[in-house]
Image (tube, coloured by chain):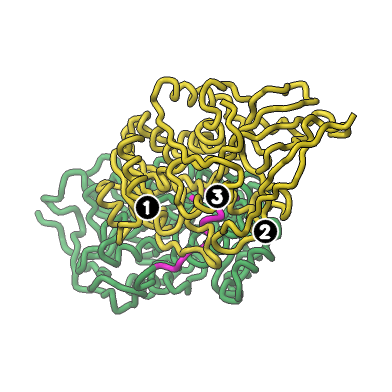
Chain colours: A green, B yellow
């Protein structure tokens, strides 16, 4: 007996993008349908999920252009994909059963048929807000965790600078650094975000980069003795200024360069990489995709921090799948305050 | 009784330099005198040395300008200083005696009074050419050794690119890489040097960067599958092209950026550092001055390689202290072929 079909709204990319994406590059397709149960003929081991929360992440910008450097570009006309929190509706996989909450790479649509559910993680702390698994307890959280603890080689008392510090990754890096006893300064693109860094996330200092005429001077003011660790989420002029202000044997974790993502042609020039020699600085790029084997350890650690009140977390939540394109465009324009989440359906 | 005085020619810097140094920035002062033995009143533990071979090294460019980033600038009107091989003439230090051969930071002059001889290394293989201790068995050799083995994390079979590959450091890095079983390509600034890389040092391939219109294409031709290790001696456009051609988890050892040393204002822009993220590349700066504790191990290893014929070594030798300024200027113009050495006095 064929499964009943249900409506399945989805977001598709209409065309590959040059420069800054706009909402017009995406489309809400409301006429698609999905099965209400696994179809006969679905690959053995598939699961059908209902998507609850979707994550807007900077790396998605790459997938909107062709070619993308380290991950496939989105397929035009098909549902976009991204990290999300989902509920299993039907399963032919022994490790998943209907009613389970999971997170992983899912479709920007109401229902998704997942043929390789091993890429999904079970949600072990469903009593915490499920949406946290789009960020704090998901990919962004793991990015902050391995980026800071593994790539920054941090020590208590060190001076840490974080850019895009109010974003999903930055707010966690700053708080991990504070928990370790570091001196932490963040940059962000609005006074509201700067206030959040100081008041909510406990950063020692913060500045609005848009109000600074000279980023080098801003960093010299915040770090008169220099920077031990720079966690770079933005690249460009901020990275160049940070390179100039590193201390001896400083470390730069190159996590993302969101300022460079929408530039139509050549990227902003850097002039100060040479300072890695006299300062003996290490610059290292990383992608969280290499580090999912650390996930279980990370999840327990950070869920513990949340329960103990050691970590604050701010989300910027929009309601409704149809608002996902605007939310994603806003992310690249820096309009979100905190982790950008799209609610498809609340299940809590 | 006061020690007899002898003539002591020396090279002094007349003025701090902007842009490319010229011979006119330095002066041979022939009227200075030195004691023939340690003066009464010399600090206890001093030694008096006769300088035999002087080393011209890229880092010296920094000391010709003010301020210099990681080492004091030369003092105008006093003898310039640099690494050299010397013979002890007189000593009040228990670990040095007249007749010993030593190498270390000495004056660009015929005789130098060294008040802190602990910075000097005894020459343990005086049967090898003494001049080798200005390069192969001295600072440049140790730079290549720690730079390659410690900072490049090399493995057999990896693809290694070395710039300024015919220079004192580059020729050794390439040969260390070949000894490890790597595929090695070098760049240099003349066909003569390129020939040397192929014929004398056993590089798998080499190119004259001055003959390449597009360094990115040159690297793609030499490394169709990308570069695992880039040992950077030059910075600038070569570094930028290398960043674009790194393989997954590649390593860049930032050893020096000689192409950037004589630029009067801003350094050449880099556009490709962002590729460290998708490629998970590590860029690390280092200075040999941190690694002299490895010297004894290095000296035995490399002296062994020389005796076994495993390492070839090419020096560019000029005769006479008065030719040292021209030799140093030539180094910054890339005129030397192999390690630039100045003979003050032959003792072999």
Q: Looking at the image, which is closer to me, B106 or A335?
A: B106
**On residue A232, which mark appears?**
none
A223 to A93, vertically: above or below: below
Is B119 left or right of B129, judged from the image as shown? right
Residue sitting at x 18%, y 60% = A35
| Res A309 visible | no
**How crowded is the residue under tag 3: few (<14 C-alpha within 10 Å), some, or many (20+)?**
many
Helix, strand or loop at label 2? It is loop
Which residue position is annotated with label 1? B242
Main SS of the magenta part reads loop
Q: Chain of mark 3?
A: B
Which residue position is annotated with label 3? B328
The verdict on residue B329 being magenta is no
Question: Which quadrant of the rendered structure holds the N terminus of chain B?
Answer: top right
First reached walking from the N terminus: tag 1 or tag 3: 1
Mark 1 and mark 2, same subunit?
Answer: yes
Outermost residue to the right: B1
Q: Position of residue B330 (x, y in %)?
A: 50, 52
Bounds of the magenta segment: A267-283
Q: Looking at the image, which is closer to me, B272 or A143?
A: B272
Identify the image quadrant of residue B120: top right
B96 to B103, vertically: above or below: above
Outermost residue to the left: A1
Identify the image quadrant of residue A6: bottom left
């Amino acid at each position: 007996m064929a499964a009943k079909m249900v409506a399945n709204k989805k977001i598709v990319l209409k065309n590959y993008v040059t420069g800054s994406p706009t909402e017009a590059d995406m489309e809400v397709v409301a006429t698609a349908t999905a099965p209400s149960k696994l179809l006969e003929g679905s690959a053995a081991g598939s699961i059908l999920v209902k998507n609850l929360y979707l994550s807007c992440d900077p790396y998605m910008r790459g997938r909107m252009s062709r070619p993308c450097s380290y991950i496939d570009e989105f397929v035009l006309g098909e549902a976009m994909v991204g990290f999300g929190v989902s509920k299993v509706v039907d399963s032919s996989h022994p490790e998943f059963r209907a009613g389970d909450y999971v997170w992983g790479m899912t479709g920007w649509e109401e229902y998704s048929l997942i043929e390789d559910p091993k890429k999904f993680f079970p949600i072990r702390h469903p009593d915490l807000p499920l949406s946290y698994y789009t960020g704090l307890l998901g990919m962004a959280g793991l990015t902050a965790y391995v980026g800071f603890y593994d790539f920054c080689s941090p020590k208590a008392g060190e001076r840490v600078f974080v850019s895009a510090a109010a974003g999903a990754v930055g707010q966690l890096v700053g708080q991990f650094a504070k928990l370790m006893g570091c001196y932490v300064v963040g940059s962000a693109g609005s006074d509201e975000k700067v206030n959040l860094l100081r008041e909510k996330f406990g950063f020692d200092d913060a500045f609005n980069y848009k109000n600074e005429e000279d980023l080098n001077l801003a960093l010299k003011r915040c770090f008169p003795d220099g920077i031990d660790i720079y966690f770079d989420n933005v690249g460009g002029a901020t990275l160049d200024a940070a390179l100039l202000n590193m201390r001896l044997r400083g470390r730069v974790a190159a996590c993302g360069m969101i300022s460079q993502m929408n530039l139509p042609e050549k990227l902003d020039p850097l002039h100060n990489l040479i300072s890695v020699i006299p300062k003996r600085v290490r610059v290292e790029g990383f992608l969280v995709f290499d580090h999912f084997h650390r996930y279980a350890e990370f999840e327990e650690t950070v869920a513990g921090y949340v329960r103990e009140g050691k970590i604050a977390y701010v989300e910027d939540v929009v309601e409704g799948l149809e608002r996902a394109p605007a939310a994603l465009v806003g992310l690249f324009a820096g309009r979100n305050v905190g982790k950008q989440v799209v609610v498809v359906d609340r299940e809590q």
